[in-house]
Amino acid sequence: MAAKTLTINGRQISAAEGSTILQAALDAGVSLPTLCHLEGVYDVGACRLCLVEVKGASKLVPACTTTISEGMEIQTATERLVKYRRITLELLFAERNHVCSVCVANGHCELQSLAFSQGMDHVRFEYIFPKWDVDNTHSLFGMDHNRCILCTRCVRVCWHIEGAGTRNVAGRGGQSKIITDLNTSWSESESCTSCGKCIQSCPTGALFFKGATVGEMVRDRSKLEFIVNAREKKLWVYQD
Amino acid sequence: MAKRILIDPVTRIEGHARISIHLDDDGRVADAEFHVVEFRGFEKFCEGRPMSEMPGITPRICGICPVSHLLASARAGDDILAVQIPAAADKLRRLMNLGQIIQSHALSFFHLSAPDMLMGWDAPPEQRNVFGLVASHSDLARAGIRLRRFGQEVIEILGGRKIHPAWAVPGGVRSPLTPEGQKQIKSWIPEAFSTTRLALDLFKQILDKNNNEMVWFGNFPSLFLGLVGPDGSWEHHGGKLRFSDSQGRVIADQLDPRHYAEWIGESSNSNSYLKSPYYLPLGIHGGMYRVGPLARLNVCERMGVPKADEELRQFKQLGKGAVTSSFLYHYARLIEMLAAVEFIQAYLDDADLFSTHLRADAGINNLHGVGASEAPRGTLFHDYTVDENGVLTKVNMIIATGQNNLAMNKTVAQIARHYIHGPEIPEPMLNRIEHGIRCYDPCLSCSTHAIGQMPLSIELLDVRGQVLDEVTRG
């Protein structure tokens, strides 16, 4: 595979043709904040946290879904990007009901960690305080839509790792909702195999093992990666 | 000409409150009311949450007694799961509750109330606080602050943090005591005994000087409610309810807390966010009862540990039947702290505390569950109704401070009648009225959840309800 040469933050690097900016950056040791990205499933560019500046492009582009090209000049941490990432995070917090102190994912939440790392010490937007329900009907799992950021990781793992196609998205904009089957309660889903992959994929406390209490939702993403590597690369042992 | 004096806020209590004093045509005190003017609303906004989250959410009601809510909530969860929790989990919960009783009682006595008793009722307000106490009685103040720290460390050692540990869960607890934790708690015991002894001796010395306060600070007949063991001994977690009267007679005993609604009625009043529970069989007028340290010592026959039992014997001599002066809440608090230290010492060598079999697992087996536990301020009830998926449809919490509402009103009226003569309110009188409230160590932040603000101001109203005088402290 041919290599492409490009610069990230002024540093010249090379990366395999067809790589995304995110892959190239991570390989070069440049970290980028991500939320909807999950190893093992394809990217959708939904969360807009990995936005980067590309010289000559009129708009910011998501690093996870933009393929590199020869001579690309990329900036990942400009003042403008820092400002936009923080706004994005604040809007995520304002949109639903994220109360870290009493959340099952407290201490193990990607949204919470990002808010820390991006210096989000407060939210400047008015909270909407929507009333979303909790689907606690499944015998093993629960879903609290109040804590959902619509990253669609659960939808992608359900369709493309498990192949069950139980999880879907309904609605538009901020009123979008992750549904099971054609919007039934989880316990009534005919397609759900109760595999629990969606639980392992969730970056926040939206999906949880039933009965979990504050801070108890520690997830093991390596289970998902293992399945994908086993299937695609025939790697049948855990990779550390 | 009508004049307004305002006491705002009532100081050295947990939360915000206001007092109105009503005068008759001759300018004498006719009645007084205690208003809680802050609103929390946990009962409403917890609806729709999974039941399992409640022991994480409800401790957030309070930074002073989070453990009380944690334990009552976990017990209500046990009831919904319909499980008997592992014995080790029950012992660990008890151990944490004892730590909670010590830290909260130490705060009430040393930080909030001792300044009045030791600096004097008429001391200038700028000295009558914990900083004044540090200046004048530095050893005592330091010992008191350290005693509170001991209680908080017990909580931290078990729950991972001093405030708001999410440690008890429906079905048990999340982690055991560690050998290091056991060693650390043990190292505190001699100092904890010595400080509780110091405080008890001191209180007994000042009791003679405070005879007036003992007679006028909430000294009236009422019922008393507390949890007791099967043999009528002092209980703080588990056990059954007992009501006794001011003659010391047991009027209802070994009541299952699950059926509290058969015995406790709740009335609400338009002028306060605090509900007024009463003993249902006697109605709101005859059914006033008190909870908390005074009540627990009145309803029980023994503490169950030798040093505190000796103190209880002396304490009970202060009343005919029951001890009826609310000023003696302070005394009862000290005896309970002593008992808590004794119980902690007695529990610590139990190998069960290191068990890792701590959590019973079950589905939703009851759609309704009640958890009762003795909070430092009195009996606390959490009552949850859930759907078949364990999502809450109704939450009722009966908070200790609420149960003392009728008695606090009566206490304020009694002190006002004794010390107010005419429309002017001198500051030291104001402090006595405030202290009448402090005796109960109320936690107003805990207690206002029903859907319906509280800096303390005192209003003096004439017979037509017109404000004559209002006192504020800026």
Image (cartoon, coloured by chain):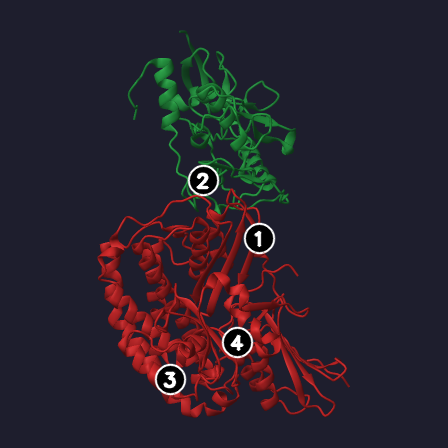
Chain colours: A green, B red
Q: What secondary structure is marked by label 2?
A: loop
Select label 1 or label 3 by which is in front: 1
Cα separation, mark 4 vs mark 3, equals 20 Å
Both labels 1 and 2 in a single chain: no
Chain containing the residue with disc 1: B
Q: Position of residue A83 (x, y in %)?
A: 56, 36
Q: What secondary structure is marked by label 3?
A: helix
| Label 2, residues with CA under 10 Å away: few <14, some 14-19, many ≥20 | some
Q: Position of residue A91 (x, y in %)?
A: 59, 38
Q: Which label belongs to residue B315?
A: 3
Q: In what quadrant of the picture does the N terminus of chain A appear?
A: top left
Cα separation, mark 1 vs mark 2, equals 20 Å
Q: Residue at x 58, y 44 (%)?
A: A123
Q: Is B119 left, or right, of B10 in this rendering?
A: left
Chain containing the residue with disc 3: B
Decide if residue B474 is in sight here: no
Cα separation, mark 4 vs mark 1, equals 26 Å
Q: Which tag, 4 or 3, sits closer to the chain's start?
A: 4
Q: Is B357 left, or right, of B440 in this rendering?
A: left
Q: What secondary structure is marked by label 4?
A: strand
Residue type (three-letter) at the residue carrying disc 3: Phe
Q: Which label belongs to residue A210?
A: 2
Give the labeled residue for mark 4.
Answer: B289
Residue type (three-letter) at the residue carrying disc 2: Lys
Give the labeled residue for mark 1.
Answer: B394
User: In front: A152, or A113?
Assistant: A152
